[in-house]
Amino acid sequence: MGGGLVTDAAGARAAERLLVVPVLPPAAGSTEPRYVLVRWPDWPHAAMLPLALAGADDALDDAVATLLRSRLQLDAAGPATLAAERVPVRLAQPRIGVHGPGWLRGVRAPASGDPQPDALLDGYVALPLAEALAALSTDVERAVLRSVGQLP
């Protein structure tokens, strides 16, 4: 069985991973929104929250709201928005048991509240876009965050 183009919707979805970026209102005295990045205990760099939709009928807004509540105790403050740009990467594709080409796509998630990470996270940072970009460790992550930062 050779690699080829994914032509079915389920296969295409399996090859795409969503990275959620909660966006908080500006801090006092600032006009720039704050982009929330998380820290994992086994990874020293700031990161975005991964989101795996279970099926084609999953509602993005519901899934993002659940993720925000469960991981950071934040409330969704508006509809989640998918970035138009997909960044090509090499991904594990468990449905077919290989690593292969895939996509990362950012999701802008307007949020409100004071982030309180769950027990599996080591912390968070809430930074203006330029500082959030600098906090990420790879060009791929920066490309995903840049695409989220361009959304209205």
Image (cartoon, grey):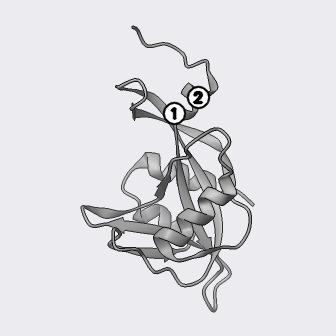
Q: Between residues 115 and 86, which one lies in front from this camera angle? A: 115
Q: Position of residue 104 (x, y in %)?
A: 52, 42
Asked if 125 appears above or below 61 in the picture, the reply is: below
Please name the amino acid that badge 1 sits on: Ala
- Pointer 1 local density, CA inside 10 Å: few below 14, some 14–19, many at least 20: many
Location of the N terminus by quadrant is top left
Q: Residue at x 58, y 51 (%)?
A: 106
Q: Which residue has dot 1 on it?
A: 14
Camera sees residue 149: no
Indicate the secondary structure of the residue bearing disc 2.
Answer: helix
Horizontally, residue 39 falls left or right of residue 17, namely left
Left or right: 6 with respect to 56? Answer: left
Q: Quadrant of the C terminus?
A: bottom right
Return the x and y of residue 6 as percentages of the image width and height: 55, 19
| Residue that mark 2 sits on | 10
Mark 2 in CB contact with mark 1 (< 8 angstroms): yes
